[in-house]
Amino acid sequence: AQSVTQLDSQVPVFEEAPVELRCNYSSSVSVYLFWYVQYPNQGLQLLLKYLSGSTLVKGINGFEAEFNKSQTSFHLRKPSVHISDTAEYFCAVTHISSGSARQLTFGSGTQLTVLP
Amino acid sequence: SQTIHQWPATLVQPVGSPLSLECTVEGTSNPNLYWYRQAAGRGLQLLFYSVGIGQISSEVPQNLSASRPQDRQFILSSKKLLLSDSGFYLCAWSAQAEEPQHFGDGTRLSIL
């Protein structure tokens, strides 16, 4: 079984400042990792994913994340945030398997609020 | 391209009434389908998933059920709603290969 911990439930940041949203996971097997964003009263939109290869993953809207296997982390970063980035962000993990449904385990979410 | 539709967008139901939420996917065949519930201020909880027609796996025992009568249709049901069933219900799909899950816009369910 796997679990995901998002260390900060709320992150306020000023516009054009950098931001890092932290995510740690635990799993006894190799995993795939994802970040999703949820705007109010909407579904989740995929920001980026790590399946294999380069540990630095670039996503949409200028976000990137780095997979650190030794620290079991997958932190999300953006060098300069905009007001429109205000949303809830979810980290998710699934174990690597073949031929079966991928059951995602989600963190509890981080509310990013960008202040003018 | 693939799209996922959920309806209704919002629903207000009295305690003890039945429930039927529908989700359909277009532009793909034999997808994996998922139902999640998101309680206020909390993360997502996987309720059911399906790898094919008539194949349903339940993650959490409760008074909800799911069915997949067609390849790209996934239905969440209840015979008698409880107050604790309030929440935001999300349907998602994924391809059989190494692809992430894609979510619908959700249904906001309020139980009175």
Image: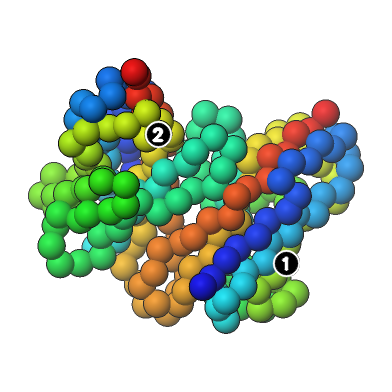
Q: Nearer the viewer, mark 2 or mark 1?
A: 2
Q: Which amino acid, mark 2?
A: Ser
Q: Secondary structure at mark 2?
A: helix
Task: Decide: few, some or many residues near mark 1? Use Cα within 10 Å; few <14, some 14-19, many ≥20.
Answer: some
| Residue at screen point 26% across, 46% down | A62
Does the CB distance between marks 2 and 1 fall below 8 Å?
Answer: no
Task: Decide: few, some or many residues near mark 2? Use Cα within 10 Å; few <14, some 14-19, many ≥20.
Answer: few
Q: Secondary structure at mark 1?
A: strand
| Residue at screen point 60% across, 63% down | B4
Q: Which amino acid, mark 1?
A: Ser
What colouring does the structure picture have?
rainbow
Residue A88 picture location, percent across and down: 43, 35
| Residue at screen point 88% across, 39% down | B16
Check residue B77 in the rendering and tell me which mark sits there, or answer none.
Answer: none
Residue B41 picture location, percent across and down: 52, 29
| B55 lies left or right of A94 | right
The residue positioned farthest toward the left in the image shown: A70
Q: Chain of mark 1?
A: B
| Residue at screen point 55% across, 78% down | B28
Check residue A84 in the rendering and tell me which mark sits there, or answer none.
Answer: 2
Question: Can see residue A93?
Answer: yes
Check residue B67 in the rendering and tell me which mark sits there, or answer none.
Answer: 1
* Separation of marks 2 and 1 at Cα, in angstroms: 37 Å
Above or below for A8 versus B72: above
